Amino acid sequence: MSLSPGDPESVGGYALVDRLGSGGMGVVYLGRSDSGRRVAVKVVHAPYAQDEEFRTRFRQEIAAARRVSGAFTAPVVDADPDARQPWMATLYVPGPTLSDVVAKRGPLRGTELRVLALGLVEALGDIHRVGVVHRDLKPSNVLMAEDGPRVIDFGISYAVDNEALTVTGRLIGTPPFMSPEQFAAPREVTGASDVFSLGSLLVYAATGNRPFDGSSPYLTGYQVMYEAPDLYGVDEPLRSIAERCLDKDPAARPRLDELRRMLRELPGTAVPAAPAVADSSDPGEAGRRVSGEHPGTPDPGLTGGGQAEGDETRTGRVRRRRRVLVGLAAALAALAVVGVSVAAVRSGPHQDGASSTSTASSSSASAPASAAKVTLPPKHVRWDYQIGGAYTPAAGVRVVGRDHDSEPAPGVYNICNINAFQAQQDEEHDWDPDLLLHDARGNVVYDKDWGEAVLDIRTAAKRQRIAAKLNAWIDECAAAGYQAVEPDNYDVFTRFPTYLKAGQAEALMRLLSAHAHDKGLAVAQKNTVELVSDRRSVGLDFAVAEECAEWDECGQYAAAFGDNVLVIEYTAKGMARACSRWGGTLSVVRRDELVVPKGAHGYVRQTC
């Protein structure tokens, strides 16, 4: 993403040329040295620079990362922990994170999985050899470079020959990938803890599922400490290897040299996945889900390589789909039995009673009760999606979607896009602080893919206040001459299930829909195929669906909205499928991933 207003032009003599991503603790930039070498420069947010405890942790991170060098890590090339805003530069590693790869392409197979596993073992060997324990090995801290994985982000690593930073009441890590000893005795972790995390990570890479995946950080911590891992779908020999890595007893886990020998036995070619057969004796099988790693548990640091956590180096206001399906687990009573320091794991405060499901049914008919007041977009027409920047529509275009800051296009049906469930990047200060979602430690929860603070929609009172601000934007859309509004990020609950429920998202959307209808605007459901059956009760009139052909979801949208669906595909494969299957009934366009204006570098627009 491009530099934002207020970003520095240089740090420590490195010219900053791009933003790679941002998170709760700082920003990662792409920088260039005088010689042209590319580096990833992590700059700490100003408020944390005033926190001496944080500075101490940052110094530890730099010291740990400097000690580690190897083919599968990103070395530190420069740093200044004592600067007004501390910073650290590491070698830039181009490539997506493992969590991005699995979320977009699915689980790894064959050679790709074998290379990942052996590369991670070698990286851990380099890390442990200098007396460092990583302590936060997870999919978003693994970059998938062309020549093998890179382990990054030593933000909470621990040098075993140094006294640990004295912190009470805090447990740092990411629960689904933490070891039991990180919960029970975090000051006593050894390299065996990273082996446990590696086991969880490899299960995730091979299946898309996490072996410990409770409905809250508390329950996940309990599973890590006391329950057997879920290894459904993990084939041999990886299954046996994972079982040993995930032993609750650190002494029983394999050493890295033994682990390397076992992982060499993994098949070097792709192995067809066995058909999934649900076991009727397993009551949890129906609820299993495939998911990318959630940013719902905020990370104390940022990645030190090519991207910030979960970032895919996209820019503008375009939002590609998150391939996350939410399971509705109840088991709240189990919270009482978590008798360890799991209370320090990040979690949201108590939620109100907004239900996570709705009993309202939907037919495939289209118009809501207030249809007389609104005009729906025409079906099966040429259209364009311009939320990344407005330009003159091509001849024959009859529908255009634009950001609410842009004027509507003359002579066509216009849809106004607003960011409804998250604060726009770097605009969280426009919101009352209590309307931003905070974790148990009081830190703002960010969607790190976009550097956006998540809004706290958990209570009716807060939803009313949030809706008041959003409805003012809807008023602006109506006054400008738009015919419809597209509230973005309706699917926020799927990315932050620790904190948010589907019913809370629906409750806010009802407030927005009612107001929009009063202003004569139709309301689009943006993505969120999980909730199409509730669209009538929520007041949603038509759908804007990203990559529904790519993910074989267009049929569900078409059935729910009577073919009044505007499809955006971003890949040639998705576009070909959309045109072949839905080009005769739905409105389909292919855009570039950044949705840049016509004439800009990378611009793509195709129709069937």
Image (cartoon, helix red, strand yellow):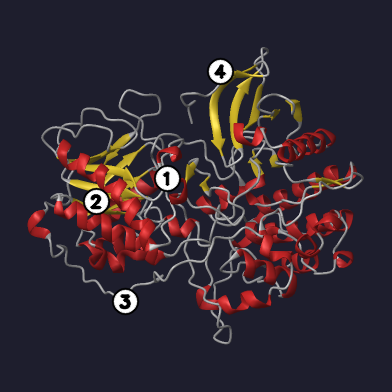
- Mark 4 packing: few (<14 Cα in 10 Å), some, or many (20+)? few
Vertical comparison of 203 with 312: above or below? below
- Mark 2 packing: few (<14 Cα in 10 Å), some, or many (20+)? some
Residue hosting label 4: 9
Point out the tag, 3 or 4, that comes first from the N-terminus. Answer: 4
Of badges 3 and 1, nearer the viewer stands 1
Position in image of residue 48 (x %, y %): 64, 36
Position in image of residue 311 (x %, y %): 54, 41
Point out the tag, 3 or 2, that comes first from the N-terminus. Answer: 3
Left or right: residue 586 compared with residue 445: left
Vertical comparison of 127 with 334: above or below? above
Residue hosting label 1: 432
User: Three-letter amino acid code at disc 4?
Assistant: Glu
Q: Which mark is residue 359?
A: 3
> Residue lying farthest right?
161
Residue shown at 79% from the left, 65% from the top:
184
Disc 3 is placed on an element classified as: loop
Asked if one can make out residue 546 in the rendered structure from this viewpoint, the answer is yes
Residue hosting label 2: 583
The span from disc 3 to disc 2 (Cα, nearest Å) is 33 Å
Are the residues at dot 2 and dot 4 in contact (C-beta closer than 8 Å)?
no
Disc 2 is placed on an element classified as: loop
User: Three-letter amino acid code at disc 2?
Assistant: Gly
The span from disc 2 to disc 4 (Cα, nearest Å) is 46 Å
Between residue 501 and residue 114, name the one nearer to us. Answer: 501
Point out the tag, 1 or 2, that comes first from the N-terminus. Answer: 1
Asked if one can make out residue 528 in the rendered structure from this viewpoint, the answer is no
